[in-house]
Amino acid sequence: MDFKQRFFIRSNTVRDNAKDFIDKLPLPMMEDGKEITKPYVVEIKPITRTLEQNSKLHAMLTDISQQAQFKGRWLSVEQWKLIMVSAHAIASGGKAEMEIGLEGEVINLRESTAQMGVKRLASLIDYIEAWAAEQGVQFRDRQGFYGY
């Protein structure tokens, strides 16, 4: 049975729901001194980016993947994400960090969007909007994001 769940603690109700969920998790079972079911991990951490930012980023990348090519190739949303995060790092004064991987491949050790704070992700979104405007990409308004 899968018990994976996220709670964004923004109210007492959500906090109470999280507590109730934890209380209902089964405890690990032991048999003959050996653990036969694994325990669960509860991680409490501050939110890094907003859900709205994450949704907007992925909506934008989806539009780009459907309208723009990179060096003559159509790319997936995840491939565009790699390209945009890397380009944004350079454009914002960072550097590209490349390494040879375990199988001899070239890899870009880029920053993670999941770890970006609100300001950093806003900067990435601004960068993508500017790039897309130069390329003629039209964003579809998926959740009221583009019609300020």
Image: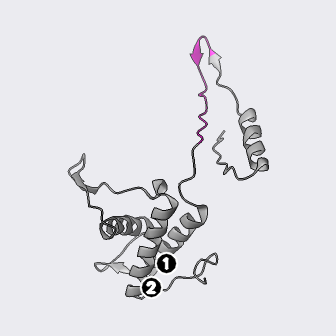
Q: Is residue 36 above or below residue 120?
A: above
Which residue is more in the foreground, 34 or 79?
79
Residue 102: % across, % down: 24, 45
Residue at 67 percent of width and 48 percent of height: 7
Q: Is residue 24 magenta?
A: no
Q: Quadrant of residue 131?
A: bottom left
Which residue is more in the foreground, 148 or 82?
148
Residue at 57 percent of width and 81 percent of height: 146
Residue 147: % across, % down: 60, 84
In the displayed orientation, state which residue is furthest to the top. Answer: 32
Q: Is residue 36 magenta?
A: yes
Q: Quadrant of residue 88?
A: bottom left
Residue position for label 1: 63
Q: Quadrant of the N terminus?
A: top right
Please, what secondary structure does the residue beneath circle 2 have? loop
Segment tinted magenta in the rendering: 31-44
Which residue is more in the foreground, 70 or 88?
88
Residue type, numbered disc 2: Val
The dot on residue 137 is 2
Residue at 60 percent of width and 41 percent of height: 44
Q: How many marks?
A: 2
Tell me: 21 left or right of 141. Answer: right
| Colour pattern of the rendering | one colour
Q: Is residue 98 above or below residue 42?
A: below
SS assignment for the magenta stretch, majority: loop
